[in-house]
Image: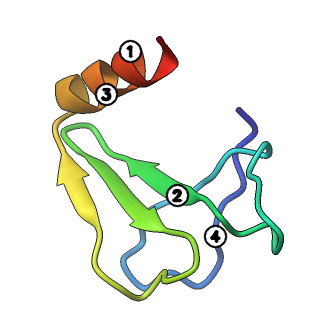
Amino acid sequence: MIRKTAAGDASELAWFKSSHSSGNDGNSCVEIAITRRTVHIRDSKNTEGPHLTLPPTVWSDFLTYAVK
């Protein structure tokens, strides 16, 4: 995964998305920002909208399940 930091985010989180994002416009993806205690997830097309916040263990479980 290549990290691409989103500029201008008022929350000061370092958002990134995969360089393998797909879709007609290249923005059909989610972005994540990782802190010590949380993983934040948002829609790359609505960066000012709501986002999910998960404990790292839940994010890890999701990735493990999603890859199978």
As displayed, is residue 11 above or below residue 19? below
Q: Amino acid at mark 4?
A: Ala
Q: Nearer the viewer, residue 67 or 52?
A: 67
- Left or right placement of residue 20 versus residue 67 in this view: right
Q: Nearer the viewer, residue 7 or 48?
A: 48
Residue located 83% across and 69% down the image: 24
Q: Label for residue 62? A: 3
Which comes before the other along the chain, label 4 or label 1?
A: 4
Q: How many marks?
A: 4
Task: Give how far across and how far down residue 22 sits, in percent.
Answer: 77, 54
State the SS at label 3. Answer: helix
Q: How is the image coloured?
A: rainbow
Residue located 66% across and 60% down the image: 5
- Left or right placement of residue 9 versus residue 22 in this view: left
Q: Amino acid at mark 1?
A: Thr
Report crowding for label 1: few under 14, some 14 to 19, many 20 or more residues within 10 A (C-alpha).
Answer: few
Contact between labelled residues 1 and 4, with CB atoms less than 8 Å apart: no
| Residue that numbered label 1 is attached to | 64
Could you say which quadrant of the image residue 6 lies in? bottom right
Which comes before the other along the chain, label 4 or label 3?
A: 4
Q: Label for residue 6? A: 4
| Residue that numbered label 2 is attached to | 30
State the SS at label 2. Answer: strand
Task: Give how far across and how far down residue 36 sits, in percent.
Answer: 26, 37
The Cα atoms of the two marked residues, 3 and 1, are separated by 5 Å
State the SS at label 1. Answer: helix
Number of the front mark, 4 or 1? 1
